[in-house]
Image (tube, rainbow, N blue to C red):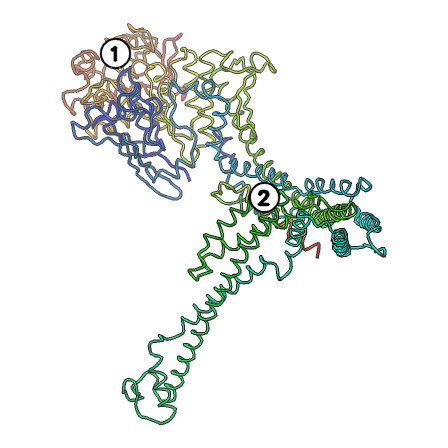
């Protein structure tokens, strides 16, 4: 799908009020506009830039308010637009051939914050993201003014890389998170527990060896030695050791507060998995209360209103005893009731009464469940209070500090509302926190508690018990981690493989684009500077740092430098121009339209021709809107592109109310025919220009020397300045060409005497407005006949001139004019 | 522009979608569950701001789940 511009319409924008703002570019035309300074040509660029700007800005006007230094958006609007009732707007009509589709988008100029972009252009602009307006001051912007991050940002935007970049960033985040969560780290940490709690006698993860050490260590505390070959054996061993410790303490009679507190807290940890644990009781109560609540809801849905209970009971008693022909409640005959019969009614009444009973039961159960939950929650509070008291005795501040928060959560639970489903999340979270506090933090804190004031042997037994507890936990966790890290490594490896594929594909795409861009850029650059002193231009993107560096080889391969520090202004501008065109060629294929506003200002005459070559040869697939104040450049373009679908216009004047005065610069006969047919007021001037061009060309061909140097033209010349010398010259051609083929012809005689040839020129008052359409048509017809005098009568080709022989000839070899000698 | 007309670069969406549909669908080379998770979290047109963290979490859960199955 490729969009072409059919029409552009500009009103009330910059120097264009309500005239001279329409451009017809249908049939894939391009246009070049020549105008001296201050004739409003850059206003067209501003209008187009505004139309296609997502945020409605024209960059060189800045983002400030009306009073800002650059004028901001307010400077886009024509100063008389409001006064003259002209709505400032820019419209474009676009056409797509396959599939056939035409859209027109209009953007009214809005100077406020709300400035919606025409939705019709959304997809088109997104699919063609490279810049489409290039002005003189933009040429060095990418090359010099943008830093590498900005350059990368631009490239990323053209290539639509932002989505890929997001993916790459997230891949990096994932990789970092996986690294942090790597079980290897915890495994290595846990491994340190083994030597620490085995008197440095074992340093490796060998479960059998560790269990054997444990069995050996407890030997002296047990009546008969035991073998510990599994973790459950170790559990039993720890319990036995604990009992032994307690016996030792009891026997010694030194039951200290420190000891009783530790024993009480150990019970907290040990009881966690038992059904009697308060945390488990609370959980169970919660589940019961939720189930009871749901049951009530379910039964309520089917139960009828209990208001009718008495009536139903009475009716049931009656209907069970006797058969009646009507409903005893509403006295309606059975066949007219919904139930249809006494039997069915009795069944329905029985069911309703049963539902009410069921509802009553469910509600009672719910009350009981809530009461049970309330009780268990109160007991939880007691449980935690005891935990707080005992922990304080052992100065376990890390445990004590967390308890006020848990008490506060208990207080805020809305248990009295009787709807546990509403607070079940908070309740479960509370239980989870309590469990974590006891299982992880309390058990860990207790191991560091040395019971004091008891006998040495009791202390030893207690310490060994703690070591064994740590070893038991370490072994359990190490086994889990051992298993986990195998799977973890596989997952991480698989993820890395996937991530690499994505990263490599992105880098590959980027390199592909950069290589193509670089080749095209270098080729375009060399079109302008063929004897280039820059062997190579480099574009180096870095996806990780998100930078793009532009460098050139200066005078020798390998002498790589930044362009800004070493190249002249014109070279830098050429890189900028080449980059702009290259990016448009690569990224804007869906909408190949560009605007070039005065891009040759910094070039000398030699290079202007090269720029014209660039435009003529490298922008074949594009529609170009070009403006220039360089008449030489304009004429070169015209000579190359007039027959290739380009329109040429001149702006000869500008006024605040009328805007630019545009005139067609048509060269082709069919264009002049069209202008005359349409009664275009510019037809006279177009014809004059046509004749001037033709005569100028013929003077050069026949070596007729005119008063003015060719190809420059001064404004005080007349057509006669060409006509006179030309006629004088052809009179001297041998073979009687003038006498027999020109002088006798009516068209020559008529033109010779017509005021156009003798009098009309540029500096006369209003010289471009002729007397009548008839005059223009007349001169045009006669001039076309005059042109044909210089064509071969045998084959119709334009005659050639041999300057040395001073003769005319045609390659067909036949008779070339009437009366030829 | 002739030579350039023949060159066509993939867009970002085409690249990503193509990778998931073709390259990464090879079950012999890539863990399909991992690919599915990456696609679910990073293969959408619009990405969650914590997509990377969420993907990491999902991969860790997958590893733990497989470790649990192996332990059984």
Coordinates of residue A363 in the picture (x, y in percent): 44, 70
Do labels 1 and 2 touch, CB within 8 Å? no
* Residue at (47, 69) in percent of width and height: A295
Mark 1: give few (<14), some (14-19) or many (20+) Cα within 10 Å.
many
Is residue A738 visible in the rendered image? The answer is yes
Is residue A234 visible in the rendered image? The answer is no
In the picture, the quarter occupied by the C terminus of chain A is top left
Which residue occupies the foreground of this view, A297 or A102?
A: A297
In the rendered image, which residue does mark 2 sit on? B56
Coordinates of residue A410 in the picture (x, y in percent): 49, 53
In the picture, the quarter occupied by the N terminus of chain A is top left
Q: Secondary structure at mark 2?
A: helix
Where, by quadrant of the figure, is residue A33 drawn?
top left
Residue occupying the far front of the picture: A253
Coordinates of residue A281 in the picture (x, y in percent): 57, 61
Which residue occupies the foreground of this view, A226 or A585?
A: A226
Which residue occupies the foreground of this view, A111 or A239?
A: A239
In the rendered image, which residue does mark 1 sit on? A723
């Amino acid at each position: 799908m490729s969009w072409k511009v059919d029409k552009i319409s500009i009103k009330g924008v910059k120097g264009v009020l309500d005239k001279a703002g329409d451009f017809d570019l249908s049939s894939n035309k391009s246009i070049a506009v020549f105008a001296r300074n201050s004739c409003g040509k850059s206003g067209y660029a501003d209008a187009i830039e505004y139309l296609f700007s997502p945020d409605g800005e024209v960059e060189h006007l800045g983002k400030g308010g009306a009073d800002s230094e650059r004028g901001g958006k307010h400077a886009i609007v024509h100063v008389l637009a409001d006064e003259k009732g002209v709505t400032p707007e820019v419209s474009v009509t676009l056409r797509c051939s396959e599939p056939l589709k035409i859209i027109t988008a209009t953007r009214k100029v809005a100077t406020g914050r709300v400035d919606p972009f025409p939705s019709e252009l959304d997809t088109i602009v997104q699919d063609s993201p490279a810049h489409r307006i290039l002005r003189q001051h933009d040429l060095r912007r990418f090359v010099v003014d943008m830093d590498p991050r900005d350059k990368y940002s631009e490239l990323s935007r053209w290539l639509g890389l932002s989505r890929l970049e997001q993916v790459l960033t997230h891949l990096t985040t994932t990789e970092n998170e996986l690294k942090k969560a790597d079980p290897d780290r915890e495994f290595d940490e846990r491994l340190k527990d083994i030597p620490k709690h085995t008197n440095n006698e074992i340093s490796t993860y060998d479960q059998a060896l560790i269990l054997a050490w444990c069995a050996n260590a407890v030997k002296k505390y047990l009546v008969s030695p035991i073998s510990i070959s599994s973790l459950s054996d170790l559990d039993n061993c720890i319990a036995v050791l604990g009992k032994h410790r307690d016996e030792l303490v009891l026997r010694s009679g030194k039951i200290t507060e420190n000891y009783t507190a530790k024993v009480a807290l150990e019970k907290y940890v040990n009881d966690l998995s038992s059904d009697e644990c308060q945390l488990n009781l609370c959980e169970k109560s919660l589940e019961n209360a939720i189930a009871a609540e749901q049951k009530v809801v379910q039964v309520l849905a089917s139960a009828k209103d209990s208001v009718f209970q008495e009536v139903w009971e009475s009716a049931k008693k009656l209907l069970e005893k006797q058969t009646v022909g009507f409903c005893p409640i509403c006295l309606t005959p059975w066949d007219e009731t919904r139930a249809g019969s006494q039997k069915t009614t009795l069944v329905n009444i029985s069911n309703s009464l049963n539902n009410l009973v069921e509802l009553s039961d469910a509600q009672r159960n719910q009350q009981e469940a809530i009461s049970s939950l309330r009780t268990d929650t109160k007991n939880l509070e007691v449980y935690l209070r005891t935990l707080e008291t005992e922990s304080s005795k052992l100065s376990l501040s890390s445990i004590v500090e967390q308890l006020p928060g848990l008490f506060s959560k208990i207080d805020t639970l809305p248990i009295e509302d009787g709807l546990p489903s509403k607070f079940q999340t908070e309740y479960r979270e509370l239980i989870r926190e309590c469990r974590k506090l006891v299982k992880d933090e309390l058990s860990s804190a207790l191991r560091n508690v040395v019971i004091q004031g008891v006998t040495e042997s009791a202390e030893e037994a207690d310490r060994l018990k703690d070591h064994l507890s740590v070893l038991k936990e370490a072994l359990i966790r190490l086994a889990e981690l051992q298993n986990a890290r195998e799977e973890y490594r596989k997952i991480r490896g698989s993820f890395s493989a996937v991530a690499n594929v994505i990263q490599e594909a992105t880098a590959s795409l980027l390199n592909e684009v950069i290589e193509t861009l670089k080749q095209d850029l270098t080729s375009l650059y060399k079109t302008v500077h063929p004897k280039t002193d820059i062997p190579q231009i480099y574009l180096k993107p870095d996806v990780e740092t998100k930078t793009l560096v532009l460098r050139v080889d200066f005078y020798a391969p390998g002498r790589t430098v930044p362009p800004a520090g070493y190249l002249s202004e014109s070279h830098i501008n050429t890189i900028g121009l080449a980059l702009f065109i290259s990016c448009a060629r690569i990224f804007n294929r869906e909408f190949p339209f560009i605007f070039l506003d005065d891009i040759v200002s910094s070039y000398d005459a030699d290079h202007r021709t090269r720029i014209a070559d660039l435009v003529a040869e490298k922008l074949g697939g594009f529609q170009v809107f070009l403006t220039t104040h360089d008449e030489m450049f304009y004429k070169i373009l015209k000579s190359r592109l007039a027959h290739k679908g380009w329109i040429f216009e001149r702006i000869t004047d500008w006024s605040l109310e009328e805007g630019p005065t545009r005139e067609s610069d048509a060269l082709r006969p069919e264009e002049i025919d069209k202008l005359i047919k349409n009664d275009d007021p510019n037809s006279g001037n177009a014809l004059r220009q046509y004749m001037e061009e033709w005569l100028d060309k013929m003077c050069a061909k026949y070596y007729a020397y005119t008063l003015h140097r060719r190809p420059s033209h001064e404004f005080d010349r007349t057509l006669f300045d060409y006509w006179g010398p030309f006629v004088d010259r052809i009179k001297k051609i041998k073979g009687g060409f003038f006498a027999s083929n020109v002088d006798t012809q009516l068209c020559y005689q008529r033109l010779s005497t017509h005021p156009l040839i003798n009098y009309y020129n540029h500096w006369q008052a209003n010289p471009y407005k002729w007397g009548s359409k008839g005059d223009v048509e007349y001169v045009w017809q006669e001039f076309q006949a005059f042109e044909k005098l210089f064509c071969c009568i045998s084959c119709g080709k334009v005659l050639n001139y041999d300057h040395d022989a001073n003769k005319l000839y045609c390659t067909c070899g036949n008779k070339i004019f009437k009366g030829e000698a | 522009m002739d030579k350039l007309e023949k060159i066509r670069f993939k867009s970002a969406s085409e690249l990503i979608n193509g990778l998931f549909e073709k390259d990464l669908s090879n079950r012999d080379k890539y863990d399909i569950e991992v690919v599915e998770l990456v696609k679910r979290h990073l293969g959408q047109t619009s990405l969650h701001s914590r997509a990377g963290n969420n993907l990491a979490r999902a991969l860790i859960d997958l590893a733990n789940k497989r470790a649990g199955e192996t332990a059984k």
